[in-house]
Every structure is written in C-alpha cells, then in structure tokens.
C-alpha cells in the first residue's frame, strides 16, 4: 500500500521535530484580520494540533480592524501617528468591546476542539488574564497618545504556571497600570 508507506515515511521524518518541540513554549501572534474570515477556523485547527503534540501555547491576538469597525459605526475615524493608534476615551471603549468579543470567540472555538476532525473533543482549556502591566506611551513628537500604552512588564511566572497546568494562554492587546488604568497596546509588542 503506497499510501501507508508514504504516511509512515512522513511520520518518521516528522517525529524528530515533534520530539524536539514537545513541552516547548510557542508564542504565536495573529492579527485581527485573521478573525474576520475563515482563516480563524484553520488557525484554531493548527493550534489544537500543536497543543495535542505537547506544545505549550501562548496566543496573542490583534484587534485593529475590529476597533476600526466599531469606531466607524459611531461615525468616528481612527487616528494614527507613526502606525500607532491614538486611543481617546471613545476609542478605548471600542478597544474593550473588541478585545472582549474576540477573546470570547477564540475561547469558544478552542473549547470545541475542532468539530468534524480527528481533533474533535480535544478539550483544550484556555486561560486569559491580566498578565500584562502597561504604562502610558505619553506624549511623543508633540502627540498625546492618551490611552495608548506600552508594555511595562509581562507576568511570565503566572503565564508559565498556567502552561504547567496544561492551559493555552490567550492574551489580548490590553495592559493594566498598577493604578488600575487600562491601555491599548500593540499586539506585536505584547507578543515579543
């Protein structure tokens, strides 16, 4: 059976990589664009597969197009300077709504496993939390970024604790200051 032989050869070729990456942590960033179309279902399938191979996952998602859509519904326009959103109070509300909805959608899909596939019923546990401490970006080049922030610290010990318990960690591009303020962050910066 040539099909069996090719599968066995493929599996033999893959096994060193599976062994090398088992119990390793992957931080994976994906933009908000991935949530807008069917790409998310393919990503979820890939995440479920990686998880089943023993890879510890930290997923960081973006929300830029979702924020833009919400602002547009309010007849507001996004303001950017040097590719960073200037997050005023109205935009911050859109950031919170977008992050919450996207987080829930991703958690829901991961909780399903991957229906109609060998990964169906995989029981993937997803944890989100306030793992990111932020500070205001402040005024740069005379531009006040308001509620746009930058990463001050990542609570990597708490993230590793959740990974050790077998959870997938899902992080939104939000950060909290020690005084309780919320900041919109660059998802790429959070992931790196």
Image: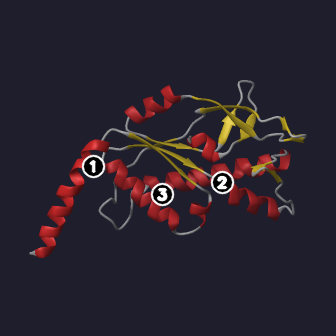
Please tell me how crowded label 1 is: few (under 14), some (14-19), or many (20+) other residues with Cα within 10 Å: few
For the C terminus, which image quadrant? top right
**What is the distance, in whole Å, between disc 3 and disc 2 at their CAs?**
17 Å
Residue beneath the point at 47% across and 64% down: 41
On the image, numbered disc 1 is attached to which residue?
Answer: 17
On the image, numbered disc 3 is attached to which residue?
Answer: 109
Relative placement, left or right, of 90 versus 95 is right
Residue beneath the point at 20% across and 58% down: 11
Residue beneath the point at 62% across and 42% down: 189
Residue 94, image x, y percentages = 76, 52
What kind of element bears circle 2? loop
Task: Say above or below: 115 vs 166.
Answer: below
Please tell me how crowded label 3 is: few (under 14), some (14-19), or many (20+) other residues with Cα within 10 Å: some
First in sequence: mark 1 or mark 3?
Answer: 1
On the image, numbered disc 2 is attached to which residue?
Answer: 63
Residue 119, image x, y percentages = 33, 59
Residue beneath the point at 29% across and 62% down: 118
Quarter of the figure with residue 176: top right
What kind of element bears circle 3? helix
Q: Nearer the viewer, mark 1 or mark 3?
A: 1
First in sequence: mark 3 or mark 2?
Answer: 2
**What is the distance, in whole Å, between disc 1 and disc 2 at their CAs?**
32 Å
Task: Say above or below: 190 vs 118.
Answer: above
Q: Which of 182 and 156 is in front in this view?
A: 156
């Amino acid at each position: 059976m040539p099909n069996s032989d090719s599968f066995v050869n493929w599996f033999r070729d893959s096994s060193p990589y599976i062994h090398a990456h088992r119990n390793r942590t992957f931080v994976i960033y994906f933009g908000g664009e991935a949530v807008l179309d069917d790409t998310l279902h393919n990503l979820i399938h890939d995440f479920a597969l990686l998880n089943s191979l023993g890879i510890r996952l930290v997923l960081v998602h973006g929300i830029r197009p979702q924020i833009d859509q919400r602002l547009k519904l309010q007849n507001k326009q996004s303001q950017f300077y040097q590719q960073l959103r200037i997050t005023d109070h109205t935009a911050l509300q859109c950031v919170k709504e977008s992050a919450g909805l996207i987080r829930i959608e991703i958690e829901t899909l991961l909780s399903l496993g991957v229906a109609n596939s060998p990964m169906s019923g995989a029981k993937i546990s997803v944890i989100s939390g306030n793992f990111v401490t932020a500070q205001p970006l402040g005024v740069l080049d005379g531009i006040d970024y308001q509620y746009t922030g930058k990463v001050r610290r990542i609570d990597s010990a708490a993230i590793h604790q959740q990974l050790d318990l077998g959870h997938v960690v899902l992080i939104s591009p939000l950060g909290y200051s020690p005084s309780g303020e919320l900041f919109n962050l660059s998802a790429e910066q959070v992931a790196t």
